Amino acid sequence: MSNNLQINISPGTVYISTTPGQSSYAKLIVTVTNVAGTATGISGIAITLPDTLAPVNTLTSIVPGMDAATTALWDFAPSMFNVGEFDASPQSGDSVSINAGGGYTFILDMVTLPNSVLTPSAMVNATVTFADGTTFTQLLVVNIAPATAAITYFNAQLSIISPGQPATLEWQCTGIDHCILVPGNGTSLPASGSFTVNPPASTPYTLYAYAAGVILSAQWEITVENPTILYFGGINGSSVVNMGESIQLVWRCDQFAKKIAITTNNQLTIPDLLTNGNTLENGTVTIGPLTAPTAFQFTAWSANGAFYDQRSSTIGITDMAISSFTASSTNIWEKDKVTLSWSGSNVTSFDISPVVGMAQSPVDVFPEQTTTYTLTAKGFVGNLPTAITKNITITVNPVRINSFLLTPQIITLGTQQGNQCTLEWDVLAQVVSINQGSTQIFSEQVTGNIAVTGSQTMTTPPDGAIYTITIGTFQNPGLHTQPITLTNAYGPYVIKNISSATFPIGQFYPFKQQPPYFLTGPLINIQNPQPSLLAGYDGNIAGAQFTGISVINGSGPAYITNGGTSLFIPNSAVMWTDPADPTGTVTIVA
């Protein structure tokens, strides 16, 4: 069936401008002709352009070929699925019959030719689908060449004019048959010439230059210093307020607005528009109270006052009202409970944001930081859905541990310098407590100012003690915790005195975790209520040694105990001096 059709494309060559800032176009005409002796039914035609010939700016209607009796049977439009494809389909029915010798012409007007692509040829794909579902595809070659024709220049004597002032566009082309100016009167213009325009507003003009196989274009914009109002109305699109409330109006103008004013049909005072950071181009103003629907008119004038732009905005009055929106407290501590309550009239639903969503009064919130809650009331003004809002801000005071320190964090137990450590804290809280393990060693509650600082000294703390500070509020006493761990070091244990070293009675002096243990000396001039018994051990430590003194097994006034971890003096003081160094140090080496 493919032999029944002949498909052609014209022109055979298109031309691309190599001049920067100019665009190139072509009008491609695809003709499908039935060259058989009998009619042929077709159900669709697809024409696909390569990247070098796309996209198409406009499509002209399909025109009948040699069979005028079958005019206007096709719909012709860009494909919804494939970029660069343009599909023709029957306007009614499943197929269209092409009589013998008849055909159709499909015109793709203003095909864009990208100037950055210059290849010797482009392949246009034409696919015909017959009534029986079979298809026939033909590749149509379009040659591409650089255009010798060109728009030498296109500009205006004046690019910026006042309203009502004329401007003259001028151009010069080479190798061009005629030109058309858009917008313009549609008549053909010479290849070189001028044209006077009087645009009412800023307007871009396009000069199209035509020659055989060539369509070029260039643009030039005439800017008219005519004020334009870009927006005027209620802030965030508001168009209604409650009875007795004010409206915040917003305006935006272009740079040609040199004077502005707002007028109204009601006896309302209009504030000075150019205060509080407002400008001629952007600003907001609050006007009210409104007790009836009010029409506002905004006017922007040109520099000479002869030209202006106007916009109107009507603000309605709704019977919808948020009567109250309150909080149980507006200044709280972190995560404390706040109860939000509200009431309204002629409202279909209320919504609280953030977080809460649609709700009924009251509702409890627990903000962790300063938060503005917005109550949105929804209803109707007439048949139009309307929403009004009110805000309330809850200031949240943070509960925070600024610092929690242990000094020193590593101590040597059994020395005069190592038997204690100091905890220090600086927090923002109402409630403060400190535990050593599971035992509470400090607590405090503060009203008013929540800045709390303090310190506590720990004497002979246990090895590896963990101190944990917990802070919070009266409502939430355990909001934040922070632990700190003490590390103990063992021996040597040094006890200094001017003339003697003393172990006070009733205290433990820890050794290292593992033996052997040594007492070094020599220790002489022992002063002891029981001089025959200096030291002993309880038998739990293998290899315990004492040099320079007698070792007496059994229990005496001083012995090793606690499973071999401590030297204990239960009921007396053992004092000695070293004659070689009477003011020096007596050392227990663990």
Image (cartoon, helix red, strand yellow):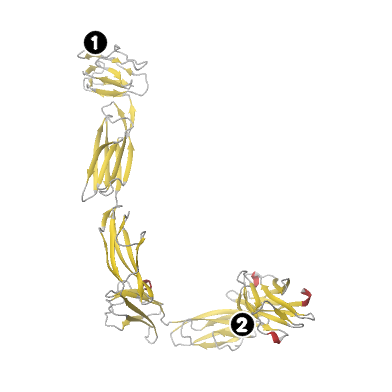
Say which of 150 and 269 sits in front: 269
Mark 1 lies on a secondary structure that is loop
Marks 1 and 2 close (CB-CB < 8 Å): no
Residue 468 is at least partly visible in this image = yes
- In the image, taking residue 406 as reference, residue 93 lies left or right, namely right
Of the 4 image quadrants, the one containing the N terminus is bottom right
**View extreme (left): residue:** 529
Q: What percent of the width, then of the height, locates residue 55?
A: 61, 73
Question: Does residue 437 sit above or below 109 in this rendering?
Answer: above
Say which of 282 and 321 sits in front: 321
Q: What percent of the width, then of the height, locates residue 577?
A: 23, 17
Mark 2 lies on a secondary structure that is strand
Tell us which disc is closer to us: 1 or 2: 1
Of the 4 image quadrants, the one containing the C terminus is top left
Residue 248 picture quarter? bottom left
The residue that disc 1 covers is 532
Residue 149 is at least partly visible in this image = no
Say which of 126 and 133 sits in front: 133
At horizontal 64% and vertical 69% (from top left) the residue drawn is: 51
Q: What percent of the width, then of the height, locates residue 237?
A: 38, 73
Badge 2 crowding class, 10 Å Cα cut-off, few under 14, some 14 to 19, many 20 or more, is many
Q: Amino acid at mark 2?
A: Ala
The residue that disc 2 covers is 209
Q: Earlier in the sequence, mark 1 or mark 2?
A: 2
Question: Does residue 216 sit above or below 547 in this rendering?
Answer: below
